[in-house]
Structures are given as C-alpha cells and as structure tokens.
Image (cartoon, coloured by chain):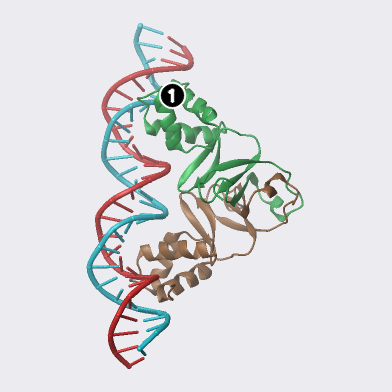
Chain colours: A brown, B green, C cyan, D red
DNA sequence: TATCATATGATAATAATTACTATTTGTCAA
DNA sequence: TTGACAAATAGTAATTATTATCATATGATA
C-alpha cells in the first residue's frame, strides 16, 4: 500500500510553490534546497506517480523536457517557440457534436504555439 | 543555398509512404531498405529541416519520441495512452472571441488522449 | 570542369529519463 | 511500543532519443 513520505510531500508542495510549469530538473533543484540529500530519481518517480494519480498534471514534452503543472483543473496552454515559456489559457467548451466524441476521450490537450511578448 | 540530395528526397517520400505518424527511428528503418548506407543523423537532420520549413509537420513527443506527420493541412490528433497509436481527427473551427486571440498564435495543437478500440 | 558551400556518414557527446539494488522508513498488527 | 514487512529512497548505472562534430563527398553554379 501507498506510503506517505516526507520527500513525496516536499515534491508535491514544490510543484505548487513553483507554480509555473516546471521541469523535473527544476523541481529537483528547488526541492534540493529544502532537502539537500534528495535523489533525482525520487523526484522523477514521485512526479510520474503524482501525474498518473492526477495530483499534478503534465503539459507534455517541450524542448526536450516534460513540463508539470500544479493546476489540475481544465485549462489550456500557450507555449513560446523561442523561450519555451508556458502560459495558462482559460478553458473553453469544445463542441460536443464532433466525430471524436465516439472515441474514448480521457483528456483534451490544447496547446497554442507562438512568440511571447518578451521575445518579440 | 539549399541542395537537392537523393537522401533528402527519399526521406520525405518515406514519410509520405509510411503515412502514419512515424518516429525518426521508424523513418530511418524504412529508408534504410531503399538506401542501406544512409546515416541516422541524416534522417534526423532532414526531418528537423523539413519540419521547420513546413514540408512535414510534427505531432509532438509521444512516449519519448517525436512523431512526424506527412499531412501538413490543419487537423488534430487522437493518441492512445496504451499503444501510443495516433489517429487523425478532422479540424474544426475554434472560436475567435477567446482571450488567446490577443497572443501571437502560429500554430494550434489539439490532442485527444484516450484508449483506442484495439486496446480496450 | 573547377569551385565551393552544403550535405552526408560515422561516431562521439549530451540530456532526459528509467532501471537497479542495497538500505531505510512508514504502517499496521500484536 | 515494538517487530515485521512492503514500499520508498539514495546513489548510481544504464538506456534512449537526439544533437554535435568533422572529415569526406556531392549538388549547384559560373
């Protein structure tokens, strides 16, 4: 059965505290400050676990690294093609009458790609 | 200036012939049959180039590998969370009046995740 | 055909992630 | 509270996808 470890708690808290769609590496760096002996494998393991249980969500792989998201409510993303920064975009209802409704949809992922204000 | 090489041609043809959202590795395997001495780096290089020039499109990284798409017209995707198979989903118009219209959108990526018929 | 910039092939290097394993630690029952 | 044990951790090796490097080859152009 699942156990409650301090590492797990710190990792999940850190994702929330970081806020902005961090990579596993960034979570590791942040967590290391509070818990210097934590292993990178532990961070990866817990993030993967939390993602599969729905405690955090994933945005997908951007510029080679998976991006995690503390916000598990329905929303979409904008990603800058230059700096790879991520911005939340509010969810909007998708039509119900489209052909993909016959599929077994578990998750809808909508990502907008472009150049952010800072980068233009 | 850009040159027309046999390798480049074979690679682009192969993406079209394969049809179904191959990885670079799968393109390499397929291309190798026609051109046994081709280098994997050449395949990666040409796919990246073709993607940035718009000759092919990319679906994103799925299960650790970038998936390429010969279909450059506007459309969306369904990806099976078990077998990682990809299916095209017809494009539908997205609303114009949403907040993200103030952003500099170059590309809209919509991916549905679920379990495909074969896998259920 | 000579020139030269660009592409290729072969392979090394990198980066992200996962696998492995000895050790530690929550949890639960007595 | 303690003992037992399944599950998690730390540390590190291994894997996998992709990119970098560079000597050689080859399209394109004059």
In the drawing, does residue A34 fall left or right of residue B19?
left
Q: Is residue B1 visible?
A: no
Q: Nearer the viewer, residue A62 or B99?
A: A62
**Secondary structure of residue under mark 1:** helix
Could you say where residue A94 lies in the image, as x and y percent from the top left?
72, 53
Which chain is mark 1 on? B
Residue drawn at point x = 68 percent, y = 48 percent: A102
**Mark 1 crowd level (few <14, some 14–19, many ≥20, 10 Å Cα):** some
Q: Nearer the viewer, residue A104 or D9?
A: A104
**Relative vertical location of residue D26 with respect to residue C16 in this rendering, above or below:** above
**Relative vertical location of residue A88 with respect to residue C26 in this rendering, above or below:** above
Q: Nearer the viewer, residue A27 or B111?
A: B111
Q: Dot 1 corresponds to which residue?
A: B7
In the drawing, does residue C21 fall left or right of residue B21?
left
Residue drawn at point x = 36 percent, y = 24 percent: B36
Could you say where residue B116 lies in the image, as x and y percent from the top left?
58, 47
């Amino acid at each position: 059965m699942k156990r409650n470890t301090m590492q797990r708690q710190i990792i999940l808290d850190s994702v929330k505290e970081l806020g902005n769609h961090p990579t596993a590496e960034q979570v590791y760096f942040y967590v290391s400050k509070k818990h210097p002996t934590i292993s990178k494998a532990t961070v990866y393991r817990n993030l993967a676990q939390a993602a599969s249980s729905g405690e955090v969500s994933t945005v997908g792989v951007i510029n080679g690294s998976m991006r995690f998201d503390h916000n598990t409510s329905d929303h979409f993303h904008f990603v800058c093609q230059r700096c790879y920064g991520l911005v939340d975009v509010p969810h909007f209802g998708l039509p119900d009458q489209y052909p993909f409704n016959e599929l077994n949809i578990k998750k809808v992922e909508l990502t907008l790609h472009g150049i952010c204000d800072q980068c233009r």
